Each structure stands twice: as structure tokens, then as C-alpha cells.
Image: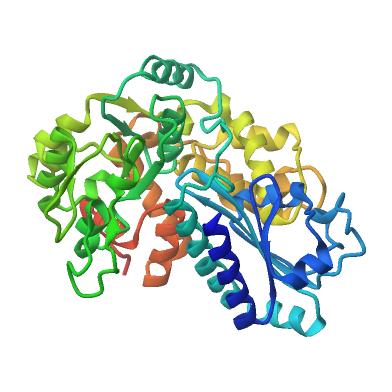
Amino acid sequence: MSSIIAITKVINAFAELLQIEIALFNPEGVLIASTEEYKKRKGNRIYLSFFQKQYEHPISFVKKPGHMKMCKGCHFQNNCPSTAEVVKNMVENGNHYGYLSFVSFSSDGQDKMIDHQKEYDYWMSKLSDIIVSHLSDSSSSVFKKKREHTEYILGNSYKLNKLKELIKNIKNSSSSIFITGETGTGKSLLAKLIHEQSIFRKGNFVEINCSSIPESLFESELFGYEEGAFTGAKKRGKPGYFEMADRGTLFLDEIADLPIHLQPKLLKVLQDGMVQRIGGTITKKVNVRIIAAANQPLENLMETKQFRSDLYYRLNVIPLHLPPLRERKEDIEDLVQNLMEKLQTRTGKFINSYDKNFLGKLKEYHWPGNIRELENVLEYSMNMERTMKLTVASLPDFLMKDTPPSVSAKNGSLKDTEKEVIIEKLHQYGYDLEGKKQAATALGVSVRTLYRKMGNLGISVPK
């Protein structure tokens, strides 16, 4: 329990620095560490149902504790000693470490929390990182709890059921998997589903987006480094993603953006299962299941020597294709119900039904942005809806236009469809730098990747 003692000391130091009270709970809602004032005012009990609703929002601000819809059922309802709270659900690499709470018991503290939300968000994240680091390095199982099984890929269309059946057939395999699919289809969620149904499910699921890491840092992130390997290197060094995923799954998303000079090193690790940190002399054996994904065929990149063919064939042992939403519209109903539940906390509206005309309009649309675009549309509609049931009146204007799906969406190539999606988002957010940043966020890619795709697809900035 030495890690708990160390964490308690850190919590008290942060509490004194920020002039607040702090509490830490395990995944079952049991108080593990806190300041004395917190324990005195609120005791050891928490309203676990409220904390569990925070899964989709890692950090949440509660401005009126005891008097909000989310507080219904709490033993402190309408009589909470807290004046404001910040709650964080600590989840990392598929492990659930519990809940962290910043609390104020005064009106001055309430004003300070509300006025400086970004600062509290920052310090909450810093403290959470320290706690998770302590628990990850220790053998304590007080906090760790795997995510419960989640139905990541919803729907019962023929194509999706065929894909799910294939995943069951390979659950005992350790072979590399390569997932293709358009932007927004849910390749990351499919990778998590494969992990949870595989022989590697007891290990970590570690995800890395190859387009979001600066090229200069890529090698150190992937393979780790030893102390003193370079200026700014942490004491005792740092493990890389391969070491973190040992006996688990490493998901390499946007693999097309992997720098060419690192591709031979990745290939070598895949072949012999040995990694060596930057600045180190010792190699370490790792047992990692690799899942890679791309939203474009890699054949073109192989022809232009931007992607090694030997690496491609090493990754593409078991190819899987995630169909776009327009090819499985019968799944829209299941997706809508699930996404509405997910969006209730984000929108602050507990809408859980819709009329048949609303669903009909969703099925008419061709969804170039796939499930990510469907989620954006539902979030907009839930914000705009004035009743307790979603209606066509709350749908965005572009979806209400009575235009048939484009030819490229029906019969065109993946490349044509991707171009259409990007142009649509740029028209929506603008072609300036800020607009491109927002478009990249909506598409789930980095700005660097967006620029590269615009160049490859011949998308020019309108005069």
C-alpha cells in the first residue's frame, strides 16, 4: 500500500496549492485517499451512478452539486455541502483507475472554479497522470479494473455480421491485422473489439495515431528511450509503445503516415519481436499483437516508394474492411439509439426517442462522413430540439435538402468519396487555417494529414 501513501501525500500537496479539497475513489466508488476536510464533510460514500455517467467526458464540471439532473438519486440531493466540483474518470490504455474529484465547500471557491475552469482542467490532468503513473508502476490492484465489454461495432447488417463472424474465427490467432475503411467508419472501435475478443485481451490495448506525432519524436515514442539519451530525456527513461503493449495489442492508426525511415525498424520488430530503446544497449523481447489501419489503399504509396512493400505484406496478413455507413443503412437505427445515450451528458438533454420521419431522413442521406458525421448530426439535433423527441425540425439544413446521393458516393472509388468528404467539411468550416483545423478535428485527422490529403486529392483553395 506504499503507493496509496505516496498518492495521499501528493493529493494533500495539490490541495494546499490550489486551496481546494480532493478525493480519490476506486472504480467501485470506494474512497481510497482524500483530504481530511473532504472526508469530514462528505464521508466515504459517493453517488456511483453519477460518476459512471462521466465515461464519455473524462473531465466534468458540476456547478450546482445536489441541484442538477445528474444528482437525482444521490443521498446529498438538494442538500450537498459542495458548492462546486470537478470530476475526472481516470481511464488509460483500457484500464480504469477510478475517479478523481476536486471540491469546493465555499462560495468563493465556487466562483474561482467556475471562472478558471481551464486551470482546474490542467491541474486535474496533471494530478491524474501522477496517480496513474504510481499505480501503473506498482503491483497494487486497488484501482485497476478493465473496461467492461462494450459493443463497439453496432448493427446487424449482412456485411457487418460477416465481419463479426470473421473476428470470432481469428480470436486465437496472433497474426497481424490490417483494417481499411473510410474516415469515420470506426476503425479504432473495430480494433478494440478485436482486442477484447482475442487471446491478448488480458494485456493493454495501446493506440497510436501515426499522423498526430511529430516525426522527430516518433522513434522515441514507438521504441522508448534511456535516461540521458537526448536533451530533455526523463530520468530513468521512458518505455515505448511496444513495451507498453507487451502481451497486449498495439493499434497503429493512420499507418500511411508512418515516416519512411522508421518503416524498416518497425518491420524488424515485427519479424524478431525485439525492441531496443534509444540510447540503450539492451534488447527486450516483446509479445505484441499488431493491428494497423488506413483510410486509403496503400498500393499507391507503395508505387511511389512512400511505403515499403515488405512492411505492407507483413502487416496485411489478415485484411479486414469496415464498410461505409451508406452500405449498411439498416444499422442506422441501432447506431442512433446508442449515440443518443452517449450524447445526453454532452448536450445536457436527456432525449432518448425520435419520430419515424426523423429516422427516415437519416436513412435517405448518403453519409460521406460515416458514423462520425452521424454523431455530429445527432449532437446538433439534440441541442436544437425543443421537445423530448427528435424531429426533422431539429436536423441541420444540409441534411434537409432533397438531393440524391452523388454518383461517387454510390459507385465511385474510396478516393473519390474521401475527396467529397474533405471538400464538404472545408466548405462547412472554411479554407483558412482555423477552418482547416476545425475540419481536421471533425474528420478525426491531424492538420498535417489534412494538408497531405488535399495535395494528393487535388483539392485547391477557392479564390
In the displayed orientation, state which residue is furthest to the right. 78
Q: Residue at x 27, y 34 (%)?
A: 287
Is 181 rendered above or below residue 39?
above
Asked whether the viewer can see residue 459, the reply is no
Q: Residue at x 57, y 77 (%)?
A: 119
Q: Residue at x 74, y 37 (%)?
A: 354
In the displayed orientation, state which residue is furthest to the bottom. 108
| Left or right for 121, reference 179 | right
| Left or right for 243, reference 141 | left
Front residue of 109/458: it is 109
Q: How is the image coloured?
A: rainbow
Residue 14 appears at what percent x and percent y? 59, 76
Q: Quadrant of the N terminus?
A: bottom right
Residue 234 appears at what percent x and percent y? 29, 69
Q: Quadrant of the C terminus?
A: bottom left
Residue 10 appears at what percent x and percent y? 55, 71
Number of marks present in the image shown: 0
Asked whether the viewer can see residue 12, the reply is yes
Is 373 rendered above or below residue 67?
above
Residue 428 appears at what percent x and percent y? 48, 59
Front residue of 446/250: it is 250
Q: Residue at x 68, y 44 (%)?
A: 28
| Left or right for 207, reference 460 | right
Front residue of 100/252: it is 100
In the displayed orientation, state which residue is furthest to the front. 2
